[in-house]
Image (cartoon, helix red, strand yellow):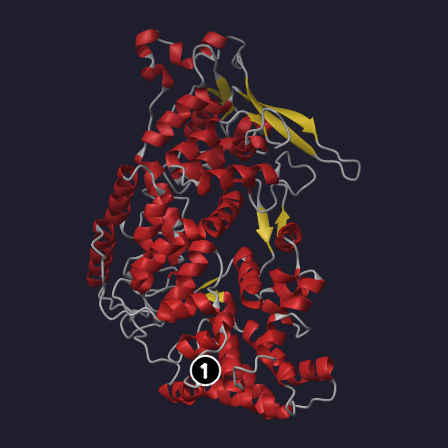
Amino acid sequence: MLRRRFSSRHGKVAVTTVAAATFLFSVGGWRSSVIAADASTTTKAKTVAAASKTAGVNPAARAVAASSTPLPRVQKKVNDFGVPQVALINTAIQKGWSDHNLAPSKQATDGEWCRRVYLDVVGRVPTVDELTAYLGDHRNDKRERLVDLLLSDKYNDEYTRNWSTIWTNILIGRTGGNERKSLVDREGMTKYLTDTLKYNKPYDQMARELITAVGSVRPSDDDFNGASNFLADKMAENGIQATAKTSQIFLGMAVQCTQCHNHPFNEYKQNQFWEMNAFFRQTKIEPLDDSDGKKKKRVARLVNKDFKGEGGNASKAEIYYELRNGKLKVAYPVFVDGTSLAAVYAKKGEDFGDHGDLKDINRREELTKLVLASREFDRAIVNRMWAHFLGYGFTKPIDDIGPHNPPSNPELLDQLGKSFRESGFDLKKLMRWIALSEPYGLSSQIAGRNQDDDPSLGAKPMFSRFYLRQMEAEQLYESLITATKADNTVGKDQARDLKERWTRQFATAFGTDENDESTTFNGSIPQALTLMNGELVRRATGNQPGSMLAKVAGDTKMDNAQKIRYLYMAGLSRVPTKKELAISNELLVAHQGKVGLALQDIWWAVLNTNEFILIH
């Protein structure tokens, strides 16, 4: 394949079959990526001499030169950084290893850990300068310093961009606002989340605003409320999806199928679904036309209105649901723990809590109070955040917690939930605790006594190693942009539009009553590069004047070995192994001194590796 690629792009260049096959094996398989950061001292020795001659050279050359200095690759001692919650995590996870006779993998190398924390916190790989700065830090608290830096004002714009994308996909899906039938304004959702995350709004306040929102989803309207987008597409059929998604996202409870019958495999009952659904019956949708002359699109306004009940009596605003045998049953607002509004307001009258008039009871506001007070609320977000950073939550799936699906470490989940609540629902603090923990700092390599710790085969995750996972489409896009600096060739608005169009290609809405959607993003870099709209990719991987490759190739302050190292650091956050460097040199020879073309092929191969797309 590599031979064909050379022939198609460069015509006259012929690379031997052996060299091509060896090069692909060298950088293309996961075997190289799990040993990648263990670049041999022999490779380093070759480049140190060249790097030592670069005093006074440009920043790119200095970055490569600095990376050649012998550095401690591994965080040798487990450190809780004096943070009680980090110590709590480490102690609980270590106990799990002991109870299951597991030995953890070694600590990840500095390059591996640096790369993963950049991807998880700001959604992209580190630049060569950022990586070099971290590798050159010899202090024992360097990991703590980097986590705090990524959560600081310096990176707040990137943090906000990354997490607003994540939460947009959680709350409205990747297709929300992109489908013609959708009532969501995706820009409005993103704007709300950007403003929320930029100032680290407490998570309980964010949840309250989303569950109780009223107003237009459209930013141009006077009554715009971006939080309204959460429920805008979920109020069909009397709010079935509002019931299901609110329970799933904020309580970690999968109750969708109980709308028709008691769950066959867990404790959830049909009456519980409809009693939760009763909280949403005062909520109505007012469709708004959003046509611009070129395309027809509807959006919505979310409003609260008096609910007279299905029997027409607002003082006893009941709803009815049908059992599988055809019988009708009545339901009133009752939370999943059995707390009814009738009981909450019993002192005001036997049926006061069941009133449907807004002047008496605002049901969504009452639901929010119950949600935020429940322990399921804090445990659900801890489980979700843990899964984001560690690849798996304490349960699988992360939004289905209960006696039927107990957490792998229930005590830790419970204690972290309490600590998060006591922190004032501070999301950045929760991220900090997890990112500084021992399990997050482990290598992805399997050790002698943890090969059975494999959640992909159905085992409960014990986090004795870092589980490999694929980048999300948005992470891949941002990492390609960071590694290639391709965004330097387009304006800010154009760059945003390119990203939206690119990621939109992978999501497909099924149109079911569960608002299901699918992603066709399978992690293939060739697929990604092919699907990305042409010119940006050509600039990203091309060597035309002004491109990253052209600048590296034309940099007279770096020798060829340093240029190859720079590409590896930009793409894989490591230096090439001795074998990779040797094959790269063969390609340089094959290109008969045309350094730019040789680097272009090396760069293309680096971006095509499993190592580039995997978080490891």
Q: Position of residue 496 (x, y in %)?
A: 62, 51
Of the pair 98 and 432, the residue shown nearer to us:
432
Q: Residue at x 54, y 15 (%)?
A: 310
Up the image or down, 202 lies above or below 509; here it is above
Up the image or down, 254 lies above or below 7; here it is above
Q: Is residue 116 visible?
A: yes
Q: Amino acid at mark 1?
A: Thr
The C terminus appears in which quarter of the rendering?
Answer: bottom left
Q: Residue at x 65, y 49 (%)?
A: 493
The N terminus appears in which quarter of the rendering?
Answer: bottom right
Up the image or down, 94 lies above or below 352; here it is below
Q: Residue at x 50, y 75 (%)?
A: 58
Q: Position of residue 215 (x, y in %)?
A: 56, 25
How busy is the neighbourhood of tag 1: few (under 14 within 10 Å), some, or many (20 plus)? some
Up the image or down, 502 lies above or below 206; here it is below
- Callout count: 1
Of the pair 255 and 214, the residue shown nearer to us:
214
Q: Residue furthest front?
A: 56
Q: Seen in the image, is 381 located left or right of residue 491?
A: left
Q: What residue did someone put label 1 on?
A: 54
Q: Position of residue 25 (x, y in %)?
A: 52, 83
Of the pair 162 and 50, the residue shown nearer to us:
50
The image quadrant of residue 248 is: top left
Q: Position of residue 499 (x, y in %)?
A: 62, 54
Q: Secondary structure at mark 1?
A: loop
Q: Is residue 616 visible?
A: no
